[in-house]
Image: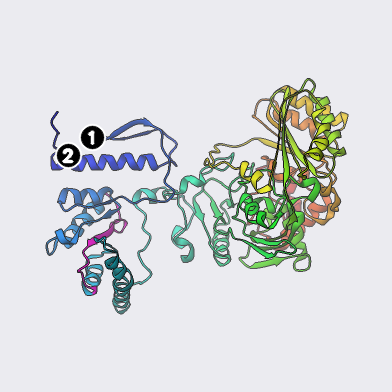
Amino acid sequence: MGETKLTPGQSVDALSQAIDVIRGRWDVANRSVLRAGGEHHHVDGAKRGPAPAHAIPIWIGARGPRMQRMIGRTGDGWLPSLPWLQPGDLGRGNAMIDGAAEKAGRDPREIVRLLNVSPNETVEDLVRLALEDGVSTFILAADDAATIDRFGHDIAPAVRDGVGRARAQRGTSTLGRVRVRGATALAKRRPGIDYEGVPEALVATAVEPGDHGYARYTSSYLRGGAPGLILRPRSVAEVQEAVRFADRHRDLPLGIFSAGHGLSGRSLNRDGLVIDVGALNTIEVLDEASGLVRIGPGALWVEVAEALAPLGFAITSGDYGGVGVGGLATAGGVGWFAREHGLTIDHLRAVEVVLADGSAARATATEHPDLFWAMRGAGANFGVATAFEFAAARVGTVAFAQLAFDVPDSAGFLEGWGAAMEAADRSVTGEIILGRGGRSAQAMLVVDSDDPDTVVDRLQPFAAIAPLSDSSIALTTYDGLMRAMVSDAPQQGDGEPHSHSGNVDHLSPAVSRALATLIDSGSSYFFSVRAMGGAVSDVPSDATAFAGRSAAFNVAAFGSPGSGFDERWEDLLPHLNGMYLSFESDTGPEVVARAFPPAHLARLRALKAEYDPGSLFRDNFHILPADERAEEEDEPAD
């Protein structure tokens, strides 16, 4: 079969269609199926993705006018080769590309001008090409190591210096290429946001709805989002800039994003601002003897576990390694060592915060002690945490057990589980998850011991609660356990999660029967009971903003609106004593009032009036400032 040769016009069409298909596959922020291309290259109903880890520009090397016009319409860069060009070709090509770009509604600056050059080009020639023809990137056509080394060490720096001096003499900016967004990206900007007023230090890393990487901010673990602008500071000073920018947009929602794993999903929003502190992810051991460690809010808890494991330390930190430090360390932190070591916040020794006015503060037991109190349990209302100092605990090999039960009676099972957990040695912590309808249960337990006989002895009372359908026990390390609890899959939350949370002092017969009524109804498709008590209860209730110290358990459930789930949860409220806000999706003053006892809430409102009187930080379970207390009864739920 003979090869079909395309005409020049068909070749341009084929390349343009191929680019459409490639970009369509990469556009994972678009949830629709992909239909792109045309006669030569096309897809019809393909799944988008995977997205590249970084933006990949499409550079096109071409000399013909048809191709150059196509570059102007759709390309990211023009990459000709200097040895093949005649005098004036660069200028004519640039003009052709610029005209086609403007005709297509694009800013010509979107299109990078690159050039393949030979080793024989002089510094003066390259400086002239940069200044007169707008070439910003030179690619050396050579494979000889000595030639490449000479170009990198001698030629390239001299070219940069020459261009910099010439631009300085002309009064032209020497800051490098301005970030330019095309018409398509600009059309996706949200009203009410001063995009042109983004602080200079944040421009390069900011993400808008039309940018590569935006898809990361359309899904958290369970909740969808569509923010209008994401600021990604890389330092405390840049966090301060981001907060001041947010203060100028006080009428818009503001989310603080560390990893997006919070069940309520409040780190994202729609059409508002998000400050992503993921770049503040350092982990630094300050004192090996005492286990004092400094951690940025953007680090993941699995990374913390891995960094501390060689030293024999760990910080109890939730039950999933992919959670960001910032969200959990300001809320509480019910983890695998809760009964033995308490909450994550109980190991906090200092926290550094950017406040609503853009100032930075360090809070400890002696510096800003009221702020330190508030940040441990209600931190999302008071600022953006930029660093935490924790006292880690000595932890060695542990046992991780998974027990699967057939449950003939969910009320009896819960009562037995509660009794076994409260009677267990403090080295045992874990949770139980009951399936829809309550006829099966999956337990996950950690025993802080490396002795098999001790482990089995401490687990035996749990195994006797109900018939076991499966079981496994493995000796592991804490960092190994946290690694096992991480998924590499991207977060794909969409819509609004529907969850409720509550603390119970004991799984008494009355409480167990009330919980079983909801479980047995089938209106909750996920129902969990996490162990607290022990070291959690050793801390006085008024020592931190987190107040649920008397509770031996936290219960959390997911359901669907209209299934009777909400009504049955309302029936549970008389049996609950506070809640863990990170597991609750409802908002509003009445929810906040259930989370904090009256004395706690009064103190928090007074501190809110002091540190954030204008309620900049209000989109994660808003605590009303004290002077707005009279308005509370009239404020509708979010």
Q: Mark 1 Cα within 10 Å, few/some/many (few <14, many 20+)? A: few
Residue 106 is a magenta residue: yes
Q: Is residue 325 left or right of residue 125?
A: right
- SS class, disc 1: loop
Of the image marks 1 and 2, the number of the one nearer the N terminus: 2
Q: Is residue 369 visible?
A: yes
Tag 1–tag 2 contact (CB < 8 Å): yes
Residue 15, above or below 435: below
Furthest-bottom residue in this view = 169
Which numbered dot is residue 211? none
| Residue 373 position within the rendered picture, expressed as x and y whole percent measured from the top left | 77, 59
Q: Is residue 184 left or right of residue 297?
A: left
- SS class, disc 2: helix
Q: Is residue 576 visible?
A: no
Please give the residue where the numbered disc 2 appears in the rendered image: 10
For image coordinates 32% across by 76% down, the residue present is 161
Q: Name the colour scheme.
A: rainbow
Q: Is residue 626 left or right of residue 264?
A: right
Chain part drawn in magenta: 104-123
Residue type beneath disc 1: His
Furthest-top residue in this view = 408
| Residue 414 position within the rendered picture, expressed as x and y whole percent measured from the top left | 81, 29
**Label 1 to label 2: alpha-carbon separation:** 9 Å
Please give the residue where the numbered disc 1 appears in the rendered image: 40
